[in-house]
Amino acid sequence: MGGLTVITGPSGVGKGSLVTQLLTRHQQVWLSISATTRAPRKGEKDGEHYFFLTVDRFKELIEEDGFLEWAEFAGNFYGTPSSQVKQKLMNGKTVLLEIELEGARQVRSSFPEAFQIFIAPPDFSELERRIRARGTDSDKAIERRLFRAKEELKAKNEFDAVVINDDLEEALHELEQLMKLF
Ligand code: 5GP
């Protein structure tokens, strides 16, 4: 049986880059592909970055108990399909979930043995700069993400560990230690 690690942190904190590096460097790590109702960003592929679903299909899956956790974030639904996660854990993989705060809280109660890591920015103004610099979201979406980021930061002490993503290499090294990836 493998282990489950949850990575949470505000939008723009650089979770994506950290996770990509972990996957490149450690073959035993498997990243769960989430389902979402948000529209694909430029370059995002269905089944690779997300499973892009309609709201109706997403709600059907909730009814069918198909999600390990799900949450609404900045006006869209996001969820972790449970079947693949369970299968990968049985195969001894280190399963990684990169999800927002509400989902992490659900996993904490349904899967208490999961290790939960919060990725924090060096400070809030840096986070705001990164969210705005991404240039892929509308002004309204950016405001929602900034509001949500403030809320998420308040919850960081609920987590088993907090990693500050200032220098990418240093943050990666810390993650590798916490996940015991040697
Ligand atoms: P984005 O739209 O930027 O790809 O993701 C927005 C937020 O949703 C991020 O904080 C991301 O971690 C989170 N997220 C992605 N997939 C899931 C999921 O399956 N469940 C939950 N709860 N959050 C998710």
Image (cartoon, rainbow, N blue to C red):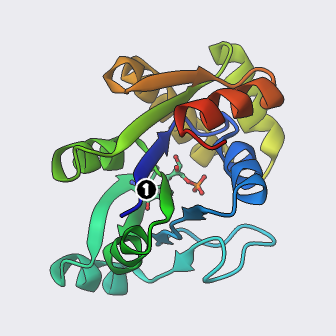
* Quadrant (top left/top right/bottom left/bottom right) for the C terminus: top right
- Number of numbered discs visible in the structure rendering: 1
| Residue 19, position as x, y percentages in the image | 67, 50
Query: x, y percentage for residue 80?
Result: 39, 66
Front residue of 172 and 80: 172
In percent of width and height, residue 9 lies at 52, 35
Is residue 113 placed above or below 146 in the rendered structure?
below
Ligand 1 under 8 Å from disc 1 Cβ:
no
Q: Position of 90 compared to 36: left or right? A: left
Name the residue type under label 1. Gly
- Residue at 43% in and 83% down: 54
Rendered residue at 54%/31% (across/down): 178
Residue at image point 31% right, 24% down: 158
Q: Is 159 left, or right, of 23 in this rendering?
A: left
Q: Residue at x 53, y 68 (%)?
A: 38
Q: Is residue 182 above or below residue 25?
A: above
In the picture of the structure, the residue carrying the numbered disc 1 is 75
Please tell me whether mark 1 sits on a helix, a strand or a loop: loop
List the single residue furthest toward the front: 182
Nearest to the observer: residue 76 or residue 122: 122
Foreground residue among 181 and 137: 181
74 to 50, vertically: above or below: above
Q: Where's the N terminus, which quadrant?
A: bottom left
